[in-house]
Image (spheres, rainbow, N blue to C red):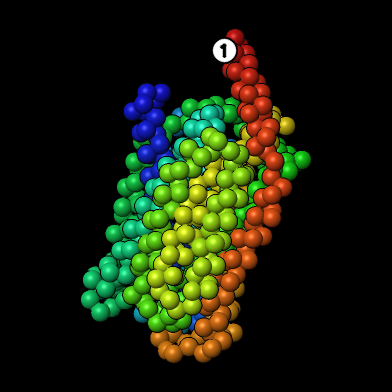
Amino acid sequence: MNTTAGVWRQRIGYGAADLSCNLVWQMIGLYLMFYYTDVVGLAAVQVSLLFLLTRVLDGVTDIVMGIIIDKTNTKWGKSRPYFLWGAVPFALLGILAFYVPDVGPAAKVLYAYMTYMGLSMAYTMVNIPLASILPSLTSDPQERTVLATVRIIFSFVGATAVSVLTMPMVNALGRGSQADGFFWTMVIFSVIACLFFFFTFKNVEEKVQVQVENVTVKQAFSTLKGNKPYYIFALNILFMWGSYFFQQGALIYYFTYNLDRPDLVGLIAGIGSFVPIAGTFLTPIIAKKMYKRTLFMIASVVNLAGILTMLFAGGVIPAIIVGAVIAALGFGTRQSIYFSMQADPVDYGEWKTGINAAGILSALNGFLGKVTMAVAGALFGLMLEWGHYVPNETQTTEALFAIKLGYLIIPAVLVVISMIIMSFYNLDKIYPKIRAEINVRNAAREKQEMVV
């Protein structure tokens, strides 16, 4: 797969997996809370507790999945098989999550727990390998950036499809029933996601033999000892993604109730998922000319400027749209370089210990992301409860303020904290030396194994 066609086949195959993830997970982030509160009729505090417990528990499964990957040895590799094995469960549970039967209130809550928890676990099964496989696809830092960029572009395509098409599809397929509309929309997205995971499995290949023996849990965690770049990177996840999850969950509420413009939900959500592609395209080019951390900081400033523009725009729709575009440009670049960076602390740990634990470190990243998503969703639900939010009614001043906090104010604060944390990340300066030494070490090991 060293030909140009082979390289691009792998890039597209890798990106297709994130497109699949986003066809389902974007529905969760944008619409599941609204579906539970305004369609199914669950109380905001019930949904808040559901999100918190399910996502934190699901975060634990990320760790387990990372351990499983590090112990996996098949003819297809460590991470790749899970795209095949997890595709159908992921699609099926995605459909079931948006099908709540007409039963009693307690049974609805129980069903929501079972299906959402199952979907989260299935997501872990296909998403953790997406991160852990990157160091095995190539050892070239620039190609990693390209792969990460292609991945993000495809993720934005999937997210944009969900953002722009969901509500029109819900209205068309539901024929007056939002419950039916959400169900059939999810059927379509889930089936497509399943097929794209099969495509990914066929077109990616684990070419870099980073570790030939099984890695014990103790060995995997030993790579964290003294791994300062990873600690900084991991801490940043809480605030970088916290900003995103707050905005994502509050979007439909903000435009429906604060601005009384539910017709803009698709447009703003589409901007948030499509416009970032422009910033993402530029990431590999800019990354050649500066450190990854520097690019991350610049992108964060742009993202923050967009959020603040929306905050101070009030009800001026053109200004809000401009702010959304600016924020999306910054977010796209920041997310792309983030995914490119996450393989580097893995290499740092291997350099110091001789152990590659891509699975467990990717799982820890996933765990932190799930905890962040859980806390953001739970806090926003509690904020709605504090404001006496009532679905499909005129909201109290407190409820409107809670929604504004979730959509604009808290995300802006979290972006600032994220930038402060990343100012301490200095791995970029020594990474070329680290990668060169790992390559020499791996080449020597392979030569020794050939002799044996």
**Is 117 situated above or below 140?**
below
Q: Residue at x 44, y 70 (%)?
A: 320
Q: Nearer the viewer, residue 298 or 446?
A: 298
Q: Residue at x 26, y 73 (%)?
A: 171
Quadrant of the rendering where the C terminus is positioned: top right
**Crowdedness of circle 1 by 10 Å Cα count: few (<14), some, many (20+)?**
few
Q: Nearer the viewer, residue 450 or 408?
A: 408
Residue to which mark 1 is pinned: 450
Q: Residue at x 57, y 75 (%)?
A: 405
Quadrant of the rendering where the N terminus is positioned: top left
| Amino acid type for the residue under numbered disc 1 | Met
Q: Nearer the viewer, residue 78 or 44?
A: 44
- Provide the secondary structure element on which disc 1 rests: helix
- Counting from the top left corner in percent of width and height, residue 322 is at 43, 65
- Counting from the top left corner in percent of width and height, residue 30 is at 43, 67
Q: Determine whether, in the image, residue 79 is placed left or right of residue 263.
A: right
Residue sitting at the far right = 226
Which corner quadrant of the image does residue 316 belong to? bottom left
**Is 200 situated above or below 422?**
above
- Counting from the top left corner in percent of width and height, residue 148 is at 48, 41
